[in-house]
Image: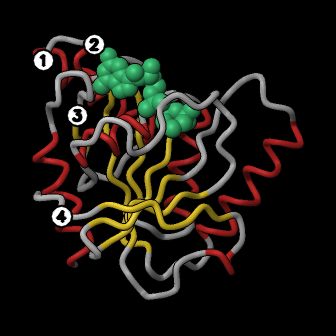
Amino acid sequence: MKIRSAEITMSAVNRAQYPDEGIPEIALVGRSNVGKSSTVNTLLNRRNFARTSQTPGKTRTINFYLINQEFFFVDLPGYGYAKVAKSEKEKWGTIMERYLADREELCAIFLLVDIRHEPTSDDVMMYEWIKHFGYKCVVIATKADKIAKGKYQKHFSMIRKKLQLDKDEKILPISSLKKTGVEEIWKEIISQYNE
Ligand code: GTP
Ligand code: MG
């Protein structure tokens, strides 16, 4: 995918702040620290477009990145950070629910999980939410450089089983360190927003 332009257009908490041009959206969700910002940077082939150095659990806004004037990457706040107060978690829930309920522009949600580990109960909850709201889910297995390629299938099975993915839902690996998996994910993004 040739990136002609990428701009951060919006940091939103309320519906009124969301873009309203009817441009398709692909959202990224996952635990804090799972590699969401790194994945955005890797896909865009930029070093520091989405910030990777933020304190975990501090991102409490929805960031809209307009790519090639064609679609938005929507960077949703991360979850599962242990030290976050209950009131913060409630705020997170409100922001997420407001966005996920009835978002016509949203073509698919990419759920990011760490390739090494069994998905957490928060990941399972997030997957169930995605299904509850009726969106398509694609799982991105991050930090793929941390295990040998020969082990990918075994880890995919573990992830698939824990999340109870539907048969037709994909798991695609990415390594932001080694820049692998990028083309396959672009193919998936393009097919999702052109459907
Ligand atoms: P929050 O914004 O806090 O929710 O985190 P995030 O999901 O955006 O994670 P981020 O991209 O900031 O990455 C978290 C840490 O994981 C950083 O130290 C990254 O360098 C590291 N990391 C991300 N992707 C990879 C990867 O593919 N391989 C390796 N080895 N490390 C990675
Ligand atoms: Mg981030």
Q: Quadrant of residue 189?
A: bottom left
In the rendered image, the quadrant that contains the N terminus is bottom left
Q: Is residue 133 above or below residue 41?
A: below
Give the amino acid at mark 1: Lys
Badge nearest the viewer, 2 or 4: 4
Give the amino acid at mark 3: Pro
The tag on residue 4 is: 4
Whether disc 2's CB lies below 8 Å from ligand 1 is answered yes
Disc 1/disc 4 C-alpha distance (Å): 32 Å
The tag on residue 146 is: 2
How is colour applied across the structure in the image? secondary structure
Dot 1 corresponds to which residue? Answer: 149
Q: Secondary structure at mark 2?
A: helix
Give the amino acid at mark 2: Lys
Q: Residue 193's spot in the image, x, y percent?
A: 26, 73
- At 44% across and 51% down in the image, what residue appears? 28
Q: Residue 123's spot in the image, x, y percent?
A: 54, 38
